[in-house]
Image (cartoon, helix red, strand yellow):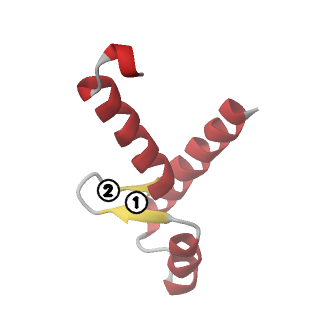
Amino acid sequence: MIEGIISLEKAALQRLTEDRLATGELGDEVETMLSEAGIYWDTINEEYFNMDSFQRETYERLAAEYAPSNHA
């Protein structure tokens, strides 16, 4: 179930990114609504991302890299 939701979210973020790249900014109202949902524009990679997903992936990566395997 969770994997399906994550897949839908990634597809939606990809579509938002494509729309922004094709037409420019999506407008203040849309940007405000997205930021309230935790979705932001990454000016370096030029894509939308979900802050919660980014933080979760970062913590998982750091835990795998730095936590001893016997404490996982």
Q: Name which residue lies at 69% across and 40% down.
A: 5
In the current view of this chain or complex, which residue is farthest to the top? 70
Q: Is residue 30 above or below residue 23?
A: below
Q: Position of residue 28 (x, y in %)?
A: 50, 85
Q: Earlier in the sequence, mark 1 or mark 2?
A: 1
Q: Is residue 62 left or right of residue 51?
A: left
Amino acid type at circle 1 is Leu
Q: Is residue 63 above or below residue 25?
A: above
Mark 1–mark 2 distance (CA, rounded to whole Å): 8 Å
Amino acid type at circle 2 is Glu
Q: Name which residue lies at 51% across and 47% down.
A: 14
Q: Crowdedness of circle 1 by 10 Å Cα count: few (<14), some, many (20+)?
A: few
Which residue corresponds to mark 1?
21
Q: Position of residue 3 (x, y in %)?
A: 66, 31
Q: Secondary structure at mark 2?
A: loop
Hey, which quadrant is residue 4 in on the image? top right
In the current view of this chain or complex, which residue is farthest to the front? 71
Q: Name which residue lies at 43% across and 74% down.
A: 25
Q: Crowdedness of circle 2 by 10 Å Cα count: few (<14), some, many (20+)?
A: few
* Comparing labels 1 and 2, the label whose residue is closer to the camera: 2
Which residue corresponds to mark 2?
46
Q: Nearer the viewer, residue 29 or 71?
A: 71
The C terminus sits in image quarter: top left
Q: Are marks 1 and 2 in contact (CB under 8 Å)?
A: yes
Q: Name which residue lies at 41% across and 48% down.
A: 54
